[in-house]
Amino acid sequence: METKKKLRVIISGGGTGGHIYPAIAVAQTLQKRLDNEVEFLFVGASDRMEMEKVPKAGYKIVGLWISGIQRSLSAKNLLFPVKVISAVAKSLGLIKEFKPDIAIGFGGYASGAMMYAATLKNIPTLIHEQNSYAGITNKILKNKVQKIAVAYDGMEAFFPANRLVKTGNPVRLDICDTKSKRAQALSFFGLNPNKKTILVIGGSLGARTINQSIEKDLALLQQANVNVIWQTGKLFQSEKASSMPADFNLKIAAFIYEMDLAYAAADVVISRAGALSIAELAIAEKPCILVPSPNVSEDHQTKNAMALVTKQAALLVKDSEAKANLVPSVLNLIKNEEEQALLSKNIKGFAMPNAAELIVDEVLLLLK
């Protein structure tokens, strides 16, 4: 009897959690849909966080020697063309060896090289754009790939309309159900159930301005009698935190793997405005204050945030004003339950909880 051939899928993307976690969510959904009759090869940049996070999720990953162009005049930029040629050549080798049925790209430079190689070999291709302002890699690939999945309206400003499909941003499956986990979450973090909880997240790599703003006003937070869960990223250590009184429910972690519980515990959230963070906040229906990172291409985080702010679905504090205004703003919000309810109701309108399913539908259509 002939054994059923497994579907072979290359998934590439990385650099930040915003590219990696949607990729993992789609892989998990595809596995579930096809009863595990699928084999994956992830391709990332050899020195970025995907090399750690993807194996942790149970998938094999290969790294390419590739990195972006430095904004400042840098000798590293001279190597960029060499890296691109090397990454495309290695990608062609991986395609020859792995023989994928389809390639899916989630943005980032490694994804650009891999997806370009896949189009040269006429392999069915789909790319996903997380942001409301398209990234450079996806813009380069727009006329070469068959399908472009997007999370925002109006993306025909960047891509051919006939290739677009709006799916939203896939989020980790456990975040789709945070409401039932509140008691478990408060107990997990060791928080006081009679106090309101502020969750502070600076994205997967941390956010210096947010961290400095929180550290500066720790005394204000302590006086406000709230719980605080603070994800700092691995590059920031707070000197001040250790000197805070023992009755201050402050939980600090470099990285929170149990994000479903962090959202479940939170009454309000302070966050960067990365596309994935916004997708998670919308699904968890959390009132939030967004502090867009100024260090991203085309200032796309401000554009992501403004899409919510104009619909009264989030508040915004500029990065340059965070040290003065962030903690006072969050303390105002935590006291104002009416405003929390309004923000929560409006951000829910941005939620697309079945984004991974919609992308898998498109993948299976392309394979037909």
Image (cartoon, rainbow, N blue to C red):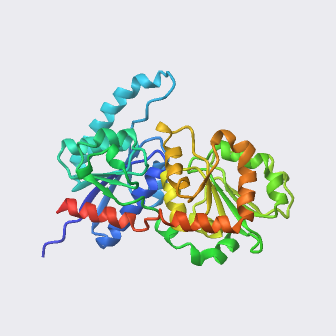
Residue 267 visible from this viewpoint: no
Q: Can you give x and y, in whole percent of width and height, for residue 288 in the image?
A: 62, 58
Total marks drawn?
Answer: 0
Residue at the location (46% across, 68% down)? 173
Residue 345 visible from this viewpoint: yes
Residue at the location (79% across, 56% down)? 221
In the picture, residue 133 is in which quadrant? top left
Give the vertical position of 149 relative to 109 (above or below). Answer: below
Quadrant of image for the C terminus? bottom left
In the picture, residue 294 is in which quadrant? top right
Closer to the camera in the image, 131 or 81: 131
Q: Can you give x and y, in whole percent of width and height, for residue 330 in the image?
A: 71, 56
Give the vertical position of 307 relative to 196 (above or below). Answer: above
Closer to the camera in the image, 172 or 310: 310
Residue at the location (62% across, 49% down)? 233
In the picture, residue 66 is in which quadrant? top left
Q: Is residue 44 left or right of residue 264?
A: left
Give the vertical position of 361 relative to 271 (above or below). Answer: below
Quadrant of image for the N terminus? bottom left
Q: Is residue 1 left or right of residue 118?
A: left
Q: Can you give x and y, in whole percent of width and height, for residue 80 in the image?
A: 39, 28
Residue at the location (33% across, 40% down)? 139
| Furthest residue in direction left, as rendered | 1
Q: Can you give x and y, in whole percent of width and height, for residue 261 in the image?
A: 60, 68
Q: Is residue 23 left or right of residue 100?
A: right
Q: Is residue 241 left or right of residue 285?
A: right
